[in-house]
Amino acid sequence: MTPSVTLNTGVKMPMLGLGTWRSEPGKVTEAVKAAVAAGYRHFDGAYVYQNEEEVGDGLHAMFDRGVVKRAELFIVSKLWCTFHLPSLVRGACEKTLSDLKLDYLDLYLMHFPMGMQPGDDLFLVDDNGQIISDGSSFVDTWEAMEELVDAGLVKAIGLSNFNKDQIEAVLNKPGLKYKPAMNQIECHPYLTQEKLINYCHSKGISVTGYSPLGSPDRPWAKPGEPSLLEDPKIKAIADKHKKTSAQVLIRFHIQRNVIVIVKSVTPHRITENFQVMDFELSEEDMKTILSFNRNWRAFPMDWATTHKDFPLNAEY
Protein backbone atom coordinates (compact mmCIF):
# COMPACT_ATOMS: atom_id res chain seq x y z
CA MET A 1 0.00 0.00 0.00
CA THR A 2 1.30 3.46 -0.86
CA PRO A 3 1.27 5.91 2.04
CA SER A 4 -1.05 8.86 1.51
CA VAL A 5 -1.31 12.50 2.54
CA THR A 6 -4.62 13.89 3.79
CA LEU A 7 -5.43 17.09 1.90
CA ASN A 8 -7.11 20.05 3.61
CA THR A 9 -10.37 18.80 2.05
CA GLY A 10 -10.12 15.64 4.18
CA VAL A 11 -9.44 13.42 1.16
CA LYS A 12 -6.45 11.07 1.06
CA MET A 13 -4.01 11.40 -1.86
CA PRO A 14 -1.49 8.63 -2.63
CA MET A 15 2.06 9.92 -2.12
CA LEU A 16 3.49 8.38 -5.27
CA GLY A 17 2.06 9.16 -8.69
CA LEU A 18 2.88 8.49 -12.33
CA GLY A 19 3.77 11.64 -14.26
CA THR A 20 2.81 11.85 -17.93
CA TRP A 21 4.75 14.89 -19.23
CA ARG A 22 6.69 14.02 -22.42
CA SER A 23 5.10 10.57 -22.47
CA GLU A 24 4.49 10.10 -26.19
CA PRO A 25 0.90 9.35 -27.17
CA GLY A 26 1.92 5.94 -28.58
CA LYS A 27 3.50 4.91 -25.27
CA VAL A 28 1.51 6.60 -22.53
CA THR A 29 -1.51 4.25 -22.74
CA GLU A 30 0.72 1.25 -22.05
CA ALA A 31 2.59 3.16 -19.34
CA VAL A 32 -0.67 3.92 -17.52
CA LYS A 33 -1.76 0.28 -17.75
CA ALA A 34 1.63 -0.91 -16.45
CA ALA A 35 1.44 1.60 -13.59
CA VAL A 36 -2.04 0.50 -12.51
CA ALA A 37 -0.84 -3.12 -12.60
CA ALA A 38 2.22 -2.19 -10.50
CA GLY A 39 0.00 -0.58 -7.84
CA TYR A 40 -0.01 3.12 -8.74
CA ARG A 41 -3.29 4.82 -7.89
CA HIS A 42 -2.31 8.46 -8.50
CA PHE A 43 -1.90 9.80 -12.06
CA ASP A 44 -0.68 13.30 -12.86
CA GLY A 45 -1.49 14.86 -16.23
CA ALA A 46 -2.19 18.22 -17.85
CA TYR A 47 -3.95 19.64 -20.87
CA VAL A 48 -0.68 21.03 -22.23
CA TYR A 49 0.90 17.54 -22.32
CA GLN A 50 -1.46 16.85 -25.26
CA ASN A 51 -1.88 13.18 -24.35
CA GLU A 52 -4.90 13.09 -22.03
CA GLU A 53 -6.98 11.00 -24.46
CA GLU A 54 -4.33 8.27 -24.38
CA VAL A 55 -4.06 8.50 -20.58
CA GLY A 56 -7.82 8.02 -20.48
CA ASP A 57 -7.55 5.00 -22.78
CA GLY A 58 -5.07 3.38 -20.38
CA LEU A 59 -7.29 4.03 -17.36
CA HIS A 60 -10.42 2.73 -19.08
CA ALA A 61 -8.65 -0.43 -20.23
CA MET A 62 -7.96 -1.20 -16.57
CA PHE A 63 -11.52 -0.30 -15.50
CA ASP A 64 -12.90 -2.60 -18.20
CA ARG A 65 -10.70 -5.47 -17.01
CA GLY A 66 -11.90 -4.98 -13.46
CA VAL A 67 -8.35 -4.32 -12.23
CA VAL A 68 -9.31 -1.05 -10.56
CA LYS A 69 -12.37 1.18 -10.05
CA ARG A 70 -12.48 4.91 -10.78
CA ALA A 71 -13.13 5.61 -7.08
CA GLU A 72 -9.81 3.93 -6.17
CA LEU A 73 -7.80 6.31 -8.34
CA PHE A 74 -6.61 9.87 -7.74
CA ILE A 75 -6.50 11.77 -11.03
CA VAL A 76 -4.82 15.18 -11.34
CA SER A 77 -4.87 17.55 -14.28
CA LYS A 78 -3.92 21.20 -14.81
CA LEU A 79 -5.48 24.31 -16.29
CA TRP A 80 -3.21 25.61 -19.03
CA CYS A 81 -2.14 29.28 -19.09
CA THR A 82 -4.11 30.17 -22.24
CA PHE A 83 -7.35 29.49 -20.32
CA HIS A 84 -6.81 31.87 -17.37
CA LEU A 85 -9.53 34.31 -18.39
CA PRO A 86 -12.40 33.31 -16.07
CA SER A 87 -14.81 32.74 -18.98
CA LEU A 88 -12.47 30.04 -20.39
CA VAL A 89 -11.81 28.00 -17.25
CA ARG A 90 -14.82 25.71 -17.27
CA GLY A 91 -14.47 24.83 -20.96
CA ALA A 92 -10.81 23.90 -20.41
CA CYS A 93 -11.72 21.60 -17.53
CA GLU A 94 -14.56 20.01 -19.50
CA LYS A 95 -12.18 19.36 -22.43
CA THR A 96 -9.77 17.54 -20.09
CA LEU A 97 -12.64 15.50 -18.64
CA SER A 98 -13.92 14.56 -22.08
CA ASP A 99 -10.39 13.59 -23.24
CA LEU A 100 -9.92 11.43 -20.13
CA LYS A 101 -13.52 10.17 -20.46
CA LEU A 102 -14.10 10.88 -16.76
CA ASP A 103 -16.91 12.58 -14.85
CA TYR A 104 -14.67 14.36 -12.36
CA LEU A 105 -11.06 15.07 -11.42
CA ASP A 106 -9.75 14.48 -7.92
CA LEU A 107 -7.52 17.57 -8.15
CA TYR A 108 -7.28 20.37 -10.70
CA LEU A 109 -4.27 22.68 -10.54
CA MET A 110 -3.52 26.07 -12.05
CA HIS A 111 -0.42 24.97 -14.00
CA PHE A 112 1.41 28.31 -13.67
CA PRO A 113 0.50 31.70 -12.19
CA MET A 114 1.04 33.35 -15.59
CA GLY A 115 -1.95 33.86 -17.89
CA MET A 116 -1.14 33.64 -21.60
CA GLN A 117 -2.88 34.93 -24.71
CA PRO A 118 -5.76 32.57 -25.56
CA GLY A 119 -5.81 30.71 -28.86
CA ASP A 120 -4.78 27.48 -30.52
CA ASP A 121 -1.09 28.23 -30.01
CA LEU A 122 -0.44 27.02 -26.46
CA PHE A 123 2.94 28.81 -26.34
CA LEU A 124 2.59 32.04 -28.29
CA VAL A 125 5.78 34.05 -27.81
CA ASP A 126 6.96 37.49 -28.94
CA ASP A 127 10.16 38.25 -30.88
CA ASN A 128 12.19 37.85 -27.69
CA GLY A 129 10.85 34.36 -27.01
CA GLN A 130 8.68 35.65 -24.14
CA ILE A 131 5.07 34.52 -23.68
CA ILE A 132 2.35 37.08 -24.37
CA SER A 133 0.18 37.88 -21.35
CA ASP A 134 -3.62 37.77 -21.44
CA GLY A 135 -3.75 40.53 -18.79
CA SER A 136 -5.58 38.24 -16.38
CA SER A 137 -5.11 37.98 -12.63
CA PHE A 138 -4.59 34.51 -11.16
CA VAL A 139 -6.85 35.49 -8.26
CA ASP A 140 -9.76 35.88 -10.71
CA THR A 141 -8.78 32.59 -12.36
CA TRP A 142 -8.91 30.97 -8.91
CA GLU A 143 -12.47 32.23 -8.42
CA ALA A 144 -13.48 30.54 -11.69
CA MET A 145 -11.78 27.33 -10.51
CA GLU A 146 -13.81 27.45 -7.29
CA GLU A 147 -16.94 27.23 -9.45
CA LEU A 148 -15.68 23.89 -10.83
CA VAL A 149 -15.82 22.44 -7.32
CA ASP A 150 -19.40 23.66 -6.87
CA ALA A 151 -20.33 22.19 -10.26
CA GLY A 152 -18.98 18.76 -9.22
CA LEU A 153 -16.39 18.68 -12.02
CA VAL A 154 -13.45 18.58 -9.61
CA LYS A 155 -13.15 17.44 -5.98
CA ALA A 156 -10.32 19.80 -5.07
CA ILE A 157 -8.32 22.66 -6.59
CA GLY A 158 -4.75 23.74 -6.16
CA LEU A 159 -1.77 25.61 -7.54
CA SER A 160 1.45 24.76 -9.32
CA ASN A 161 4.69 26.74 -9.63
CA PHE A 162 3.42 29.48 -7.27
CA ASN A 163 5.75 31.32 -4.88
CA LYS A 164 4.90 32.31 -1.31
CA ASP A 165 3.61 35.80 -2.14
CA GLN A 166 1.39 34.42 -4.90
CA ILE A 167 -0.05 31.78 -2.57
CA GLU A 168 -0.68 34.52 0.02
CA ALA A 169 -2.54 36.55 -2.61
CA VAL A 170 -4.91 33.62 -3.17
CA LEU A 171 -5.31 32.92 0.57
CA ASN A 172 -6.06 36.61 1.23
CA LYS A 173 -8.56 36.93 -1.60
CA PRO A 174 -11.77 38.57 -0.31
CA GLY A 175 -14.55 36.00 -0.30
CA LEU A 176 -12.20 33.04 -0.73
CA LYS A 177 -14.40 29.95 -0.92
CA TYR A 178 -11.84 27.12 -1.18
CA LYS A 179 -8.26 27.20 0.02
CA PRO A 180 -5.71 25.71 -2.35
CA ALA A 181 -5.25 22.04 -1.44
CA MET A 182 -1.88 21.76 -3.20
CA ASN A 183 1.15 23.52 -4.60
CA GLN A 184 3.02 21.38 -7.13
CA ILE A 185 6.64 22.51 -7.57
CA GLU A 186 9.95 21.33 -8.96
CA CYS A 187 11.77 19.57 -6.14
CA HIS A 188 14.85 17.34 -5.85
CA PRO A 189 18.16 17.37 -3.92
CA TYR A 190 19.61 20.20 -6.06
CA LEU A 191 16.45 22.28 -5.40
CA THR A 192 15.26 21.23 -1.95
CA GLN A 193 12.65 24.03 -1.60
CA GLU A 194 12.80 23.87 2.20
CA LYS A 195 11.34 27.34 2.83
CA LEU A 196 8.50 27.00 0.35
CA ILE A 197 7.57 23.50 1.56
CA ASN A 198 7.59 24.63 5.21
CA TYR A 199 5.46 27.64 4.32
CA CYS A 200 2.90 25.55 2.41
CA HIS A 201 2.70 22.94 5.17
CA SER A 202 2.24 25.72 7.77
CA LYS A 203 -0.83 26.89 5.80
CA GLY A 204 -2.32 23.40 5.47
CA ILE A 205 -1.37 23.23 1.79
CA SER A 206 0.11 19.91 0.66
CA VAL A 207 3.11 19.85 -1.66
CA THR A 208 3.81 17.67 -4.70
CA GLY A 209 7.34 17.55 -6.07
CA TYR A 210 7.85 17.15 -9.80
CA SER A 211 11.12 16.21 -11.55
CA PRO A 212 12.34 14.25 -8.50
CA LEU A 213 15.07 12.73 -10.68
CA GLY A 214 16.07 16.13 -12.12
CA SER A 215 14.16 15.60 -15.38
CA PRO A 216 17.06 13.97 -17.28
CA ASP A 217 15.05 13.81 -20.54
CA ARG A 218 14.17 17.53 -20.66
CA PRO A 219 14.68 18.68 -24.26
CA TRP A 220 16.71 21.77 -23.28
CA ALA A 221 19.32 19.91 -21.20
CA LYS A 222 22.84 21.16 -21.88
CA PRO A 223 26.06 19.14 -21.66
CA GLY A 224 27.76 19.54 -18.30
CA GLU A 225 24.57 20.26 -16.32
CA PRO A 226 24.37 18.30 -13.06
CA SER A 227 22.85 14.82 -13.15
CA LEU A 228 21.18 13.56 -9.99
CA LEU A 229 21.01 9.97 -11.18
CA GLU A 230 24.76 9.98 -11.83
CA ASP A 231 25.69 11.79 -8.60
CA PRO A 232 28.23 9.54 -6.78
CA LYS A 233 27.01 10.68 -3.33
CA ILE A 234 23.46 9.59 -4.15
CA LYS A 235 24.76 6.35 -5.68
CA ALA A 236 26.65 5.66 -2.44
CA ILE A 237 23.47 6.02 -0.35
CA ALA A 238 21.61 3.82 -2.87
CA ASP A 239 24.29 1.10 -2.71
CA LYS A 240 24.13 1.10 1.08
CA HIS A 241 20.37 0.38 0.93
CA LYS A 242 20.72 -1.98 -2.09
CA LYS A 243 18.44 0.34 -4.04
CA THR A 244 18.76 2.41 -7.22
CA SER A 245 19.54 6.14 -7.21
CA ALA A 246 16.02 6.76 -8.54
CA GLN A 247 14.49 4.85 -5.61
CA VAL A 248 16.51 6.91 -3.12
CA LEU A 249 15.47 10.17 -4.83
CA ILE A 250 11.79 9.15 -4.65
CA ARG A 251 12.01 7.96 -1.05
CA PHE A 252 13.63 11.29 -0.07
CA HIS A 253 10.35 13.09 -0.88
CA ILE A 254 8.11 10.61 0.87
CA GLN A 255 10.09 11.05 4.09
CA ARG A 256 9.63 14.83 3.84
CA ASN A 257 5.85 14.32 3.59
CA VAL A 258 6.02 15.54 0.00
CA ILE A 259 3.93 13.78 -2.65
CA VAL A 260 6.08 12.81 -5.60
CA ILE A 261 5.37 12.19 -9.28
CA VAL A 262 7.76 10.12 -11.36
CA LYS A 263 7.59 9.87 -15.12
CA SER A 264 8.52 6.78 -17.06
CA VAL A 265 7.08 4.86 -19.99
CA THR A 266 9.32 1.82 -19.40
CA PRO A 267 7.35 -0.95 -17.61
CA HIS A 268 10.26 -2.28 -15.51
CA ARG A 269 11.21 1.28 -14.42
CA ILE A 270 7.58 2.07 -13.59
CA THR A 271 7.56 -0.99 -11.30
CA GLU A 272 11.00 -0.28 -9.85
CA ASN A 273 10.11 3.35 -9.05
CA PHE A 274 7.15 2.09 -7.03
CA GLN A 275 9.31 -0.18 -4.84
CA VAL A 276 10.23 2.47 -2.29
CA MET A 277 8.12 1.41 0.70
CA ASP A 278 10.43 -1.36 1.94
CA PHE A 279 13.36 0.76 3.12
CA GLU A 280 13.95 3.94 5.06
CA LEU A 281 16.60 6.63 4.71
CA SER A 282 18.29 7.42 8.02
CA GLU A 283 18.25 10.92 9.49
CA GLU A 284 21.88 11.17 8.43
CA ASP A 285 21.03 10.13 4.85
CA MET A 286 18.29 12.78 4.75
CA LYS A 287 20.65 15.48 6.07
CA THR A 288 23.28 14.50 3.52
CA ILE A 289 20.81 14.64 0.63
CA LEU A 290 19.39 17.99 1.79
CA SER A 291 22.94 19.38 1.83
CA PHE A 292 23.17 18.92 -1.96
CA ASN A 293 20.89 21.94 -2.53
CA ARG A 294 22.30 24.42 -5.05
CA ASN A 295 19.05 26.09 -6.15
CA TRP A 296 19.49 24.55 -9.60
CA ARG A 297 16.34 24.29 -11.71
CA ALA A 298 15.64 21.86 -14.53
CA PHE A 299 12.73 24.24 -15.34
CA PRO A 300 14.02 27.84 -15.22
CA MET A 301 10.89 29.07 -17.14
CA ASP A 302 13.02 31.43 -19.21
CA TRP A 303 10.07 31.90 -21.58
CA ALA A 304 8.22 33.89 -18.91
CA THR A 305 10.84 36.05 -17.19
CA THR A 306 9.19 39.32 -18.29
CA HIS A 307 5.63 38.29 -17.32
CA LYS A 308 4.15 40.21 -14.38
CA ASP A 309 3.39 36.91 -12.61
CA PHE A 310 6.74 35.19 -13.24
CA PRO A 311 7.22 33.28 -9.94
CA LEU A 312 10.96 32.73 -9.72
CA ASN A 313 12.27 36.21 -8.86
CA ALA A 314 11.20 35.83 -5.22
CA GLU A 315 13.48 34.10 -2.70
CA TYR A 316 10.81 31.35 -2.43
Image (tube, rainbow, N blue to C red):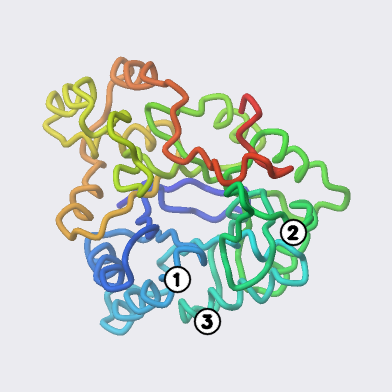
Q: Nearer the viewer, residue 120 or 267?
A: 120
Quarter of the picture containing the C terminus is top right
Using the rendered view, name the quadrant where residue 231 is placed.
top left
Gap between marks 3 and 1 measured at Cα = 17 Å
Mark 1, secondary structure of its residue: helix
For mark 3, what is the residue? 98
- Secondary structure beneath dot 3 equals helix
Q: Are marks 2 and 3 in contact (CB under 8 Å)?
A: no
Callout 3 amino acid: Ser
Residue at 19%, 52% in the rendered image: 269
Is residue 238 placed above or below 43 in the rendered structure?
above
Give the percent coordinates (x, y) of residue 46.
49, 63
* Horizontal arrangement in the rendering, residue 238 relative to residue 4 (left or right): left
* Residue 167 visible in rendering: yes
Measured as percent of width and height from the top left, residue 2 is found at 33, 50
**What separation in Å lies between label 1 and label 2 (alpha carbons)?**
36 Å
Image coordinates of residue 199 in percent, x first then y, are 62, 30
- Nearer mark to the viewer, of 1 and 2: 2
Q: Is residue 219 left or right of residue 38?
A: right
At a point 83% along the width and 47% down the height, the residue shown is 173
Neighbour tally class for label 3: few under 14, some 14-19, many 20 plus, Cα within 10 Å:
some
Question: Residue 134: which disc?
Answer: 2
Which residue is outermost to the bottom?
64
Q: Which is nearer the N-term, disc 1 or disc 2?
A: 1
Asked whether residue 182 appears in the rendered view, the answer is no
Identify the amino acid type marked 1.
Ala
Residue on which the image places disc 1: 71
Q: Earlier in the sequence, mark 2 or mark 3?
A: 3
Q: Nearer the viewer, residue 110 or 25?
A: 25
- How far is the residue under mark 2 from the one under mark 3? 25 Å
As helix, strand or loop, the secondary structure at mark 2 comes to loop
